[in-house]
Image: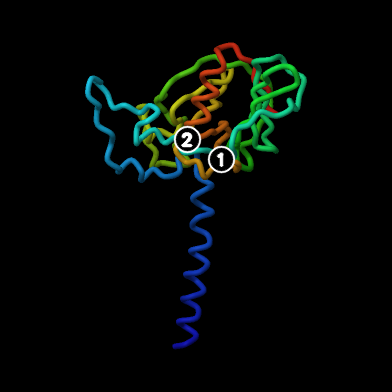
């Protein structure tokens, strides 16, 4: 009897240690259950729910990696973006040897990539249509999700070239600084909004 209880306890401990790790290995939408949370209501004078700064639903928790002005790590044109996936940092090149550095989440093992692109589109509170390949891995995902705080693309998205990759927001600040995504560059909603307001379509983006 004692051996049976001991084996059961060990099994439960192993299960508890595996579950959190599995959660962080999901695709760009970890906590699908959050959709069950009550949705925000329209504010007076607005025909749609307000998700902006000051809203309880903005999801703009500060990044665990504060953005800061630093020396530029590369010689790129002012206004361009440099992303170091190994460092898990995004740099907006300011010129005069300086850059604005942000913490990011990057592609997990098997989903990392590098290359040079330009921002081809910018969207506020973008909708999300999971690719067929992702839905095969995650059949619980919706075919389409409208923009909003529950959307895994967050408050802003900047689309890179003709790829499926984006620099986008997230309402899961705890994932910043980790390799967690399917290749997209993830930022907090607060940081991605700041970056979004500083760059334009056509901006050079170098990923290393």
The image position of residue 174, as x and y in percent, is 52, 45
Total marks placed = 2
Q: Is residue 108 above or below residue 96?
A: below
Q: Which quadrant: the C terminus?
A: top right
Judging from the image, the colouring scheme is: rainbow
The outermost residue toward the bottom is 1
Residue in view at x 51 percent, y 18 percent: 197
The outermost residue toward the left is 44
Residue 164, quarter of picture? top right
On the picture, is 22 further left or further right than 86? Answer: left
- Mark 1 or mark 2: which comes first in sequence? 2
Disc 2 on helix, strand or loop?
loop
Residue count near mark 2 (Cα–Cα under 10 Å), binned few <14, some 14–19, many ≥20: many
Instruction: Compare residues 99 and 19 and report the one nearer the observer.
Output: 99
Q: Are marks 1 and 2 in contact (CB under 8 Å)?
A: yes
Q: Which quadrant: the N terminus?
A: bottom left
Residue in view at x 77 percent, y 20 percent: 75
The image position of residue 203, as x and y in percent, is 61, 14
Disc 1 on helix, strand or loop?
loop
Residue in view at x 40 percent, y 28 percent: 53
The image position of residue 183, as x and y in percent, is 58, 33
Q: Is residue 31 above or below residue 94?
A: below
Tell me the residue that label 1 is attached to: 176
Q: Is residue 136 above or below residue 11?
A: above
Residue 115, quarter of picture? top right
Q: CA distance from mark 1 to mark 2?
A: 9 Å
The image position of residue 87, as x and y in percent, is 69, 38
Q: Which numbered dot is residue 139? A: none
Tell me the residue that label 2 is attached to: 170
On the picture, is 205 further left or further right than 124? Answer: right
């Amino acid at each position: 009897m004692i051996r049976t209880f001991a084996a059961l306890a060990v099994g439960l401990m192993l299960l508890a240690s595996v579950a959190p790790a599995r959660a962080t290995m999901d695709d760009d939408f970890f906590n699908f259950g959050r959709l069950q949370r009550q949705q925000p209501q329209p504010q007076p004078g607005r025909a749609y729910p307000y998700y902006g700064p000051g809203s309880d639903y903005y999801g703009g928790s500060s990044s665990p990696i504060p953005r800061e002005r630093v020396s530029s790590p590369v010689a790129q044109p002012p206004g361009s973006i440099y992303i170091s996936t190994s460092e898990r940092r995004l740099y907006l090149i300011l010129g005069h040897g300086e850059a604005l550095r942000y913490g990011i989440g990057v592609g997990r093992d098997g989903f990392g990539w590098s290359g040079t692109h330009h921002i081809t589109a910018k969207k506020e509170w973008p909708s999300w249509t999971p690719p067929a390949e992702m839905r095969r891995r995650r059949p619980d995902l919706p075919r389409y999700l409208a923009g909003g705080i529950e959307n895994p693309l967050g408050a802003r998205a900047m689309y890179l070239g003709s790829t499926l990759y984006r620099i986008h927001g997230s309402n899961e600040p705890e994932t910043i600084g980790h390799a967690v995504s399917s290749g997209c560059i993830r930022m907090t909603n607060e940081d991605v909004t700041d970056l979004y307001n500083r760059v334009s379509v056509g901006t050079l983006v170098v990923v290393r």
